[in-house]
Structure formats: C-alpha cells, structure tokens
C-alpha cells in the first residue's frame, strides 16, 4: 500500500491514499511506499526505521514542482501563501489569491 503524508486540504488525487501528518502516531502496517510532503521528521524517521520505501518532497517547490504562482493550481497557491505567512480567504478564487502574491 502506498501512502502520502501531506497537510494539504485540496487538490487530492483520487487514486492515492492520504494521511495528515499532524495526526501521525506510528507507521501503518502494510505500507510499502510512503511519500512525505513537507517537513515531518517524525513520520520520516518512523518509516525509515520500518525500512519502508520513502520519498520526501519539499512543500515549498524545491522538488521540481511549479514555482510560478500564475501557473500553480489553487491548492498549491494556498500552500504557498500559508508558508509565506500570508492570510487569505480560503474560499477566494484563484484570481483573488494571485493578487496576494508579493512581487519578486
């Protein structure tokens, strides 16, 4: 069984199994591959100790994911804003969210 640990709230792939790492207690039995999105050292170390195939993905775009806000999906934009400490209306459409991205 493959699992993805991510704190995302939207943009789920219906073919994947997700777990919220904030509620992690121990590795799940039967996991054969685990992807951890973000900085969750307890999750990573527990699955390493269990010798499960592990992939770690930086939630801030250093994994080759899209980094141009205009090209990001709404979920990625929300994660970007949250990581930057920028408050936003979670129901705002993409056009409104883009206006909150600081000019670089």
Image (cartoon, rainbow, N blue to C red):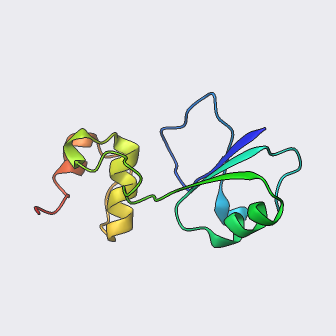
Q: Is residue 2 above or below residue 88?
A: above
**Residue 37, how many percent across, how many down?**
54, 55
Numbered circles on residues, count: 0
**Residue 10, how many percent across, how many down?**
49, 43
Direction top: furthest residue: 15
Residue at coordinates 37% horizontally, 46% vertically from top-left? Answer: 65
Q: In which quadrant of the rendered view does residue 59 lie?
A: bottom left
Q: Is residue 18 above or below residue 88?
A: above
Quadrant in which the N terminus appears = top right
Residue at coordinates 31% horizontally, 59% vertically from top-left? Answer: 88
Residue 95 lies left or right of residue 87; in this view the side is left
Residue at coordinates 16% horizontally, 63% vertically from top-left? Answer: 102
Residue at coordinates 32% horizontally, 65% vertically from top-left? Answer: 87
Q: In which quadrant of the rendered view does residue 25 lie?
A: bottom right
Residue 103 lies left or right of residue 81; in this view the side is left
Residue 29 lies left or right of residue 22; in this view the side is right
Quadrant in which the C terminus appears = bottom left
Closer-to-camera residue (54/13): 54
Closer-to-camera residue (7/91): 7
**Residue 92, how many percent across, how many down?**
30, 46
Direction right: furthest residue: 29
């Amino acid at each position: 069984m493959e699992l993805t640990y991510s704190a995302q709230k939207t943009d789920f792939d219906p073919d994947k199994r997700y777990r919220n790492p904030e509620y992690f207690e121990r590795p799940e039995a039967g996991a054969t591959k685990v992807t951890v999105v973000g900085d969750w050292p307890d999750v990573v170390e527990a699955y390493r100790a269990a010798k499960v195939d592990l992939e770690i993905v930086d939630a801030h775009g250093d994994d080759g994911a899209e980094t141009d806000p205009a090209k990001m999906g709404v979920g990625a934009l929300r994660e970007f804003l949250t990581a930057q400490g920028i408050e936003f209306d979670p129901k705002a459409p993409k056009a409104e969210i883009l206006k909150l991205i600081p000019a670089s």
